Image (spheres, rainbow, N blue to C red):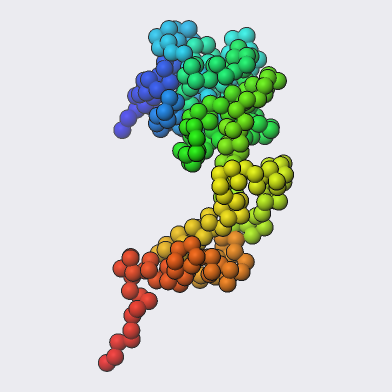
Amino acid sequence: MVSAKERMEYWQETASRVFLGLRTEQKRRNEPFFGRLDHREAGPLSVTHVHSASQRVYRGETEIARAPRECFFICMQLEGVCTVRQPRRPEYQTQPGDVELLDGVRPGQLSFDTAYRRVVILVPYAALRPRLVDADKSIGSVLRANEGTGALVSAYVNAFARNEVAEPVSGSLSDILVSLLAVGFNAKEDGPRPDTRSVREARRHAIRDYAERNLADPALSPATVASHFRCSTRYLHGLFAEGGESFMRWVLARRLARCRQALLAPELRERTIADIAFRWGFQDLSHFGRAFKAAFGMTPRECRAEGALLLGDTRSRRRPVRH
């Protein structure tokens, strides 16, 4: 079994390598330490999911000198609270969903009083700094998840970090993210808001994400979604028209896909087709049946039977044994 000291030493070494040199310190020495880093590259950016016990994280002049690299840290809290301290800057806290902009060559301290989860995205200076109206003012600031553009940035950062953003028609995912970050942090400084294409792409994703999480609600409609995002239904329809689709056709396709997945799931064999259809927001079984056949070339019943055959389940074809 690995001792607490060895775990902390290994964490220090790994975290320092991933985050370009830093120093960590366990806050509660009487509690067992744990930590996990999941890291991937995303074009010119890198994305790391952090899950750890309470700790303090330092990046001072010594650490920066050992690993000099001009980049920004885009950090979003997922669970827990982070207290941020930087020289000549007011101390502040970030809550889940908040997005902060830190400079890789400026010292600072992060403090986590409890176990926490967060996402850290490293962005090269060359990608983001030219797009910031006043980089010195933007550095060390935070976009709140419950405020205007901050909510949009938070939703896109979260989806980007989970690698669940659909590839755009033009541009790249990393470029859209960087453009959106610039829009968000420039807005804090009352600067111009360029790259409206990136904002619309991110807003379209945020709407899809919200609708996906509410597919089971039969009341889901352009009006309810527009109300949630405080925009007009005309604006909503325009966003989807840019991608050559309509919002309600997209919703129908997603509901049908969820129903098909449920019909093929062995663990849901006891659920009736009607139960599954109603579970995913359909209110008219005749409409559901017609839409399902149009989408998949077979009826819901045929789909379930085909799934049973693929799994080698012959229960639906058994005959009574005659003696």
Counting from the top left corner in percent of width and height, residue 163 is at 46, 38
Q: Residue at x 57, y 19 (%)?
A: 131
Please give left or right for residue 230 compared with residue 119 in the image.
Answer: right
Residue 206 found in image quarter: top right
Please give left or right for residue 2 compared with residue 205 in the image.
Answer: left
Counting from the top left corner in percent of width and height, residue 175 is at 50, 28
Name the image quarter holding the C terminus.
Answer: bottom left
Q: Residue at x 55, y 16 (%)?
A: 130
For residue 59, above or below residue 239: above
Please give left or right for residue 54 compared with residue 37 in the image.
Answer: right
Residue 117 vs residue 160, the one in the foreground: 160
Q: Residue at x 48, y 7 (%)?
A: 61
Residue 299 vs residue 279, the one in the foreground: 299
Counting from the top left corner in percent of width and height, residue 56 is at 50, 20
Q: Is residue 113 visible?
A: no
Counting from the top left corner in percent of width and height, residue 254 is at 53, 55
Please give left or right for residue 224 compared with residue 165 in the image.
Answer: right
Residue 292 vs residue 1, the one in the foreground: 292
Q: Residue at x 54, y 65 (%)?
A: 291
For residue 17, above or below residue 147: above
Residue 302 vs residue 215, the one in the foreground: 302
Name the image quarter holding the N terminus.
Answer: top left
